[in-house]
Image (cartoon, rainbow, N blue to C red):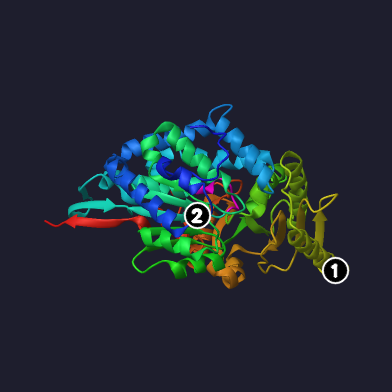
Amino acid sequence: MNPNDERVSFLPPEIQAEAGAGRPTAALVAEVAACLSAAREGYLARLPVAEIVETLDRSVGLWLEAGSPWLDTAGRRIAATTPYSEVMVRVGITRLLEGCRKDGLITLLEAELGDPEVLDGFRPRPGVRGLHRALGPALTTHIFSGNVPGLPAVSLVHGLLVKSANLGKPAADEPIFPALFARSIAAVDSRLAASVAILPWSGGDTAVAAAAFAASEAVIAYGSDDSIESVRSRVPPGVRFVGHGHRLSLAVIGREAMDPGSVASLAERVAHDVSLFDQQGCVSPHVVYVEGGGGVPPEVFAEELAAAMAAFERRMPRGRLTTEEGAAIRQARAEAELRELRGDRVRLLVSPAGTAWTVIYEEDAAFVPSCLNRVVRVKPLANLGDLPALLRPVSRYLQTVGAAMSPERRNRLADLLAPLGVCRVCSVGGMPHPPLHWHHDGGFNLLPLLKWTAIEE
């Protein structure tokens, strides 16, 4: 397979010519689904899960080897069609795919299934009588979003691990990566890749979507809350649906981490979490809470963070903005500046030129969602116990909390925030890089796709 293939589709060879003739139709989608199902029945469904893991590991390895033409092509083409710089695309895809190697795949399977071989046949399960087998969907349709290049790989990996054929709809604003990733699988095992198709269609084409959903046993969708609800409303009864919508994340720094000798390094890690993919990911922090009483005051940490944001910008420039995004940043800055002039305890720290990054220090502890694109608020916190009340108004959207504090206090913080819906507490510096086995939106990754059969004793 050629990584320089410019097509944003990846389809069974027998219908590639037909698909290239014009806009996708419901009839074409039905034909694609039939081809995928046949390929799955003839090969993927019979393949031991251990062999699937090996193939996926080798496919991911093509992207991570030195001088990879797959990564080079993705970086160049995605940077040309999205706001992101090539260096950011390359770093983001590399870090994401590093988690999809063999060890990560096995950890995911064992964490959710215990014995991965329940996907191959009937197996005993600890603590439960009888024999049990897990079966994935005959066909899963994936509706991708374009905010984080590389993320479709994870969704496709989930589908293939449970031996499902996969039909992916790429995002209109980032249609390149899904087809490239499918081609890298085909470069290792073309028969396995025959169970994958990437077909762009208009989000407003309800007839095509209806044909895809009707042929599927599961649908996975990523995007805004409105787009998730739109997809959910069109998925037929009996088809499993997994939606990943709008989420908010934050960082919390304990007083014991506010050491003058290490605060610059801490600020660099927070700047990485804020800046990678310009806060477009659901795991990017909007607010940084800094507990008072440490060796460095919260306001001084805001200065350190501003310096770290500037350094990150020099290494990895922020992407291009739309007119609306630029206006939102200027409005956030203007509001902070006005409050500062009024005498409120607010301080505005901004990039020397343009809107490359913005740090707003304010003593009002209320959680304020960012307008994104490297706009972050730093807020002092008297006590970690104050956080639940501050976060309750946005609890339905909470996802990741980056923590810099002692393990004991981090664990107590997790106990405080888990009832609010926080599904992940990690170290700062690692917020944009969840492991493959993480509880995405508080759930599992493979289990929602599976149906189980038991032989009772």
Asked if 138 appears above or below 63 in the picture, the reply is: below
Neighbor class of circle 2 (other Cα within 10 Å; few <14, some 14-19, many 20+) is some
Q: Which mark is residue 338?
A: 1
Provide residue 312's location: percent of width, then percent of height.
72, 43
Type of amino acid at the residue the image marks with label 2:
Pro
Quote the CA–CA distance across marks 1 and 2. Answer: 52 Å
Q: Residue at image x 27%, y 43%?
A: 117
Q: Can you name the residue that lies furthest to the top here?
A: 66
**Horizontal placement of 270 versus 42: left or right?**
right
The disc, 1 or 2, on the residue closer to the chain's N-terminal end is 2
Q: Which of 456 and 349 is in front in this view?
A: 456
Q: Is residue 376 magenta?
A: no
Q: Does the magenta stretch include residue 151?
A: yes
Neighbor class of circle 1 (other Cα within 10 Å; few <14, some 14-19, many 20+) is few
Label 1 SS: helix
Q: Residue 236 carries which label?
A: none
Residue 409 visible from this viewpoint: yes
Q: In which quarter of the image is residue 341?
A: bottom right
Query: What range of the chain is rendered magenta?
Result: 146-152
Q: Nearer the viewer, residue 58 or 312?
A: 58
How many marks the image carries: the answer is 2
Q: Which residue bears the numbered disc 2?
A: 24
Q: Residue at image x 52%, y 40%?
A: 180
